[in-house]
Amino acid sequence: MSEEDFVLSTLKVLGESVSPNLQEFDYLVLDLDETLIHTTNKCTKHQCDHIDLCVVFESGKKDVKVHIRSHAYDLIAWCCHNNIKIIVFSAGIKEYVEGICNQLFKDYKPIHILWRHHLIFIKGQYVKLFNLIETHTGVQMNRLMALDDNRMHYQDIPNRVIWIHPFEGVQDSHLKNVISELDKIKNSS
Ligand SMILES: [Mg+2]
């Protein structure tokens, strides 16, 4: 059995053994791109007038312009007020992810930051799993809830994910709805 087949068979087993207590969580795993932010190097004049952050990489050779999704700061504040620790899990490279996190999270920092190196490469794609978070941070899977725009990820425990419509720079209120959803989950557990 190849390593990929082994991982896929493991996923199936994990997916079938979801605990009924899956509502409880004290860590929120946040994706960056198209969930909290949208980055671009090309933008129309109208969009450039609304750039929220500009992250310059240490090499100084490259920078990215970042749109922050509406209510992203409200979500971070919600985590802080509810004592929910934040883990950032992004498919971006280390320099990019750390550069964004340094500017996006000001008063309430993520307790762990994971990047592309921490994903698994299966059938031509980088994939996130709860299993990988547990391996790399030591935080048990049954303490995690994730927010992501890409349903390819977290197939080991899909019931522990809130899926959000991708943010491509046009503001919306989806994160406000996520906060309401998290409130409901938190108060029902
Ligand atoms: Mg994403």
Image (tube, helix red, strand yellow):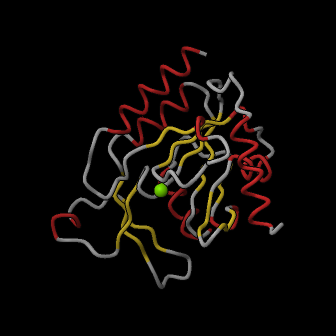
For the point 76% across and 53% down, the residue is 9
Q: Which residue lies most toward the right here?
A: 1
77 to 94, vertically: above or below? above
Q: Does 101 appear above or below 181?
A: below
Q: Specify the quadrant of the image occupied by residue 7.
A: bottom right
In the picture shown, does residue 30 fall above or below 54?
above
Number of numbered discs overlaid on the protein picture: 0
Residue 165 point in image, percent of width and height: 37, 47
In the picture, which quadrant includes the N terminus?
Answer: bottom right
* Residue 14 position in % (x across, y down): 74, 42
Q: Residue furthest top?
A: 188
At horizontal 57% and vertical 41% (from top left) the residue drawn is 146
Identity of the residue drawn at 70% across and 62% down = 118
Q: Nearer the viewer, residue 112 or 57?
A: 112
Q: Residue at x 41, y 25 (%)?
A: 180
Horizontally, residue 90 falls left or right of residue 74, namely: right
**Closer to the camera in the image, 143 or 82:** 143
Position of 89 compared to 12: left or right?
left
Residue 71, percent from left and from top: 36, 39
| Figure quadrant of the C terminus | top right
151 sits left or right of 111 in the view: left
Q: Residue furthest left?
A: 46
Residue at far front of view: 1
Quadrant of residue 86 in the image? top right
